[in-house]
Image (cartoon, grey):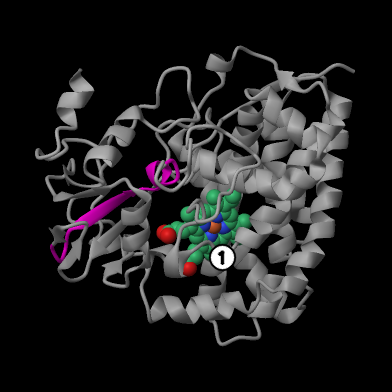
Amino acid sequence: EEITHEAAPHTELATLPTSRPAGCPFDPPAELATLRAQTPLRRMRFPDGHLGWLATSHAAVRAVLADRRFSSRYELLHLPVPGAPEGGLPPAPIGDLTGIDAPEHTRYRRLLMGKFTVRRMRALTSRVEEITAECLDAMERRGPSVDLVAAFAHPVPALMICELLGVPEADREDFQRTAAGMSDPEATLEQMMESLTSLTERVHALVPAKRAHPTDDLLSDLTTTDLTDEELAGIGSFLLAAGLDTTANMLGLGTFALLRNPPQAAALRAEPELADQAVEELLRYLTITHTGFRAALEDVELEGQLIRAGETVTLSVQAANRDPERFPDPDALDLRRSTTGHMAFGHGIHQCLGQQLARVEMRVAFPALFTRFPTLRLACPPEEVPLRTDQSIYGVHRLPVTWDR
Ligand code: HEM
């Protein structure tokens, strides 16, 4: 009853709903569906006192993401989480594309787009296949019973980022271990910061090495542009941050979702050619980058309401991707459905630059895992799988799995 009261259409919302329904770790908080049905663009009070907005429908979220009158600059944004710095966030560090607007953004984006080429992504496909097979071999030797995140979901994208950036072979294991330290649920904040610093230092050290001895990778390619060493190191670190936890959590949470939906897992096993569609549906259904933010640069009329210059709009991308007006029976995981228009990679000028790489990784990894281990199953009760409930990227910290030998 409380939920209905909180969602009454004409009062401002006091907090962003964040609790997922008990027993349904893949579903968005239930209040979001109520809001979407009543007022897809709704007044919301932020914990720092700011009066902004919450968008929950596919149409409203898409409209904001497509509109250049909304800014991504971190320093203009209020975040709907307790403890967010008052007076806005610090500006984006050099190389972070998601926190800047045109024209600065356009320059970086163009330079990078030219380097994420079809040829490079195709070359990476065969490396994904090799790396996936190596991780599965190691898993088979170590198991049955492994943590799928440590054995598979994390190393595959970590090693692929190493490929992309051209991290020398000898440094990769160490690189991957340090990267894993950044999302280790047992690590203290201090230890995580240490891992981050150490990783950034490694990327910084790579830049002069690539200038001196270019190899066939994205970072070497970028040294031929007019980007400074500082910009190159910043972009390298940003790619690492943007491409690792996202893909790793899609693989981890995606496997969890498939294991909880045996008919869908069986379909994927029976028809590995379903992989392309399956990946899109998992992206939509899980929407691990669940929430986005934009600040209005001028007054904007949307959904019959007036968003004033300076106001932050919180975008519930997870609610948008479960909008029944856009996706019939949205809460069902259905690998065969049409997912056209899902926004799991964002939308508009900031739409994910690494999406082709992420797709290649997932299209190879999911079918390979499920065909290699036909009896793959959880090794603990589902409610004991530790979830990343309070993080900007949703997923699982660990996924204990087992299989019949
Ligand atoms: C941007 C999701 C994998 C690089 C984004 C955005 C989303 C997203 C939602 C938009 C952010 C915004 O509008 O503020 C994902 C998901 C992934 C994934 C779900 C995995 C399944 C990757 C990979 C890379 C990458 C593998 C690169 C190696 C980037 C970059 C941007 C970005 C550079 C910024 C683009 C810009 O601001 O112009 N990603 N991403 N992502 N992503 Fe990804």
Q: Give the secondary structure at mark 1.
A: loop
Q: Is residue 310 above or below residue 359?
A: below
In x, y percent, where is residue 389?
A: 43, 31
Residue at point 86%, 43% (across, down): 133
Question: Residue tagged by mark 1?
Answer: 353
In x, y percent, where is residue 361?
A: 72, 51
Q: Residue furthest top?
A: 381
Residue at point 58%, 48% (across, down): 338
- Give the left or right position of residue 278, taking residue 317 as reference: right
- Type of amino acid under label 1: Leu
In x, y percent, where is residue 134?
A: 86, 42
In x, y percent, where is residue 113?
A: 59, 75
Tell me the magenta residue range: 308-322
Q: Is residue 171 above or below residue 335?
A: below
Q: In the rendered image, which quarter contains the C terminus?
A: top right
- Give the left or right position of residue 113, taking residue 405 as reference: left
186 and 334: which is toward the camera:
334
Q: Is residue 352 above or below residue 194?
A: below
- Give the left or right position of residue 232, taking residue 22 as reference: right
Q: In the rendered image, which quarter contains the N terminus?
A: top left
Q: Is residue 310 magenta?
A: yes
Which of the 4 quarters of the picture holds residue 261?
top right
Residue at point 25%, 57% (across, down): 77
29 and 211: which is toward the camera:
29
Within-10-Å neighbours for mark 1: few <14, some 14–19, many 20+: some
**Mark 1 sits near ligand 1, with its Cβ under 8 Å away:** yes
Q: Is residue 353 magenta?
A: no
172 and 320: which is toward the camera:
320
